[in-house]
Amino acid sequence: MKALMQEFPLTLELVLERCRSVGTRTEVVSVGPAGPDRRTWSEVGERAVRIAGVLDALGVARGGRVATFAWNSHRHVELFLGVPAAGRVVHGVNVRLSDEEILYQVRHAADDVLFVDASLTGRLAPLRDGLAVRDVVVMEDGSPVHPAFARCPLYEDLLGSVCPPVRRFVPEPDDAAWICYTSGTTGHPKGVVASHQAAVLHSMSSMTVDSHAISRQDVLLAITPLFHVNAWGLPYTAAMAGTKLVLPGREVSGAALGALIESERVTVAAAVPTVWIDLLADGHDLSSLRRVLCGGAPAPRTLLDEVARRGLVFCKGWGMTEMLPSGTMQHLTPDTDLDSPGAAVTMVGRPTPGVQLRLVGAEGAELPWDGVAVGELQSRGPWVVRAYLDPEDDSNTSRFDRGWLRTGDLARIAPDGTVELVDRTKDVIKSGGEWISSLALEQALSAHPLVAEAAVVGVPDPYWGERPAAAIVATAGGTPPSTEELLAWLGTRVPKWWLPEQIVPVRCLPRTGVGKYDKKVLRTQLAGA
């Protein structure tokens, strides 16, 4: 027997129409050099509809790729809504990449046109002739336009020239909606292509109480950039929920974000741990804040303590670009015992609704969820990729196992589904034939009251093969603890044969364009120390 439900495709057209119809009184606030810009979700939606006409005028065919090089603003959100709804594919390029990486991604994605913030035209000017796009559109954000882009059409002029009604494509659920590239800590980054249906279902899941719990009662500050997995999908979630959305633009210092939370009465914000560390050290009034969304890297114990001290709920999760990015979520309330095993910083919660997980051992056998067995974490679900953009990439074979994504994370899973990360397969250290968890060492070092951050890598050793080496950042205004003090601290927390051969204090740790520790760079630095 077949069901008798209406045929209603799950596409971003649904999200766009939702924000146009129910967002008449809900603000989207973007901050730029000229100050805050305030408009309603309905206005954002109407402008997003016009983007179809803009792309028609620019000659972008259905399925054509549209690159963006921009900060978080209403214009960027309009493109992430309007481009897919118009049957094209939006590609957010990370503005913090190197010249070589930017050119690689724009060429690899075969982008037709590129939309760039005026404040970023200077950054792109040296690459102007190598971008290999047909057109560049400048989005005026209050900053001057670099002379290299002075003759380019302007976003507002193009939008204003479109006369409704606009001829629009009707996308299919499995059409490509947007492209995002992995962080590429080894080799070239991989292109992840999200479908309309995956993006919609991911955002619906993010509205559930066991995930990001975004509702129309919230005021959401999206600090995570749109070029980083579509700001974790939160702009789409906010559009569906009717949530007031605050977009910080290019200024993401702790002081600027603190002032924004205070002035807009933000209730929930999303960022990587380093941003939260700076933000919570600021002196602004954060009394409106209720929840902290944190991901992208393990949160140090000092951050968890500070969030609990302020009476906030800490929502930490695990995921990856290949999962758009949500995989698990754990909510730590202010009364959670942070010294209990279930609250350890390596714990990342249970699978979010829609995600399936399994553990696979070295011999390929599936392992039990007993909280003891350690294996590679593998995932599948309606927003998990089945292949990368380049069909000839060897990763399309090595990273997938009979319909499951091989995440590259080592983990154990408790009987109730709670996931504990052990390490990354590429970061685990093999010393004398035995394994050392770099993640466990990092967490033990970060628990020291004078250590703000720690990163551990394996460096070559002529006898043991590899030995751990660590770099630490001292707490703000503090003096780094001595190597002897840290070794004594670690000696009561990890096996003695795990103790690092060297512990180097640094002013800051090298990071990738999305804020993760760049262990490729760190290995080179520490191997030569």
Image (cartoon, helix red, strand yellow):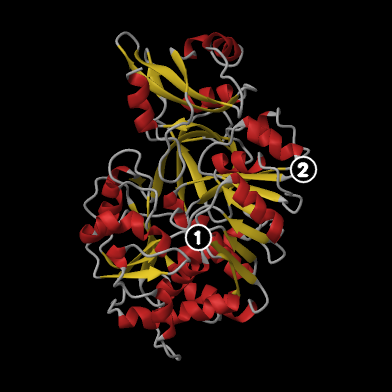
Q: Nearer the viewer, mark 2 or mark 1?
A: 1
Residue 396 appears in the rendering: no
Query: Which quadrant would the C terminus be assigned to in this image?
Result: top left
**Residue where numbered disc 1 is placed:** 72
| Residue 19: quadrant of the picture | bottom right
Residue 401: x and y, percent? 35, 45
**Residue where numbered disc 2 is placed:** 311
Residue 95: x and y, percent? 39, 53
Residue 336: x and y, percent? 75, 37
Q: Is residue 291 left or right of residue 429?
A: right
Residue 398: x and y, percent? 30, 42
Q: Vertical placement of 349 versus 17: above or below?
A: above
Q: Is residue 343 left or right of residue 66?
A: right
Amino acid at dot 1:
Asn
Q: How many marks?
A: 2
Alpha-carbon distance for marks 2 and 1? 28 Å
Q: Closer to the camera, 169 or 112?
A: 112
Q: Closer to the camera, 57 or 146?
A: 146
Amino acid at dot 2:
Gly
Residue drawn at (58%, 19%) of the image: 479
Secondary structure category for the residue under label 1 = loop
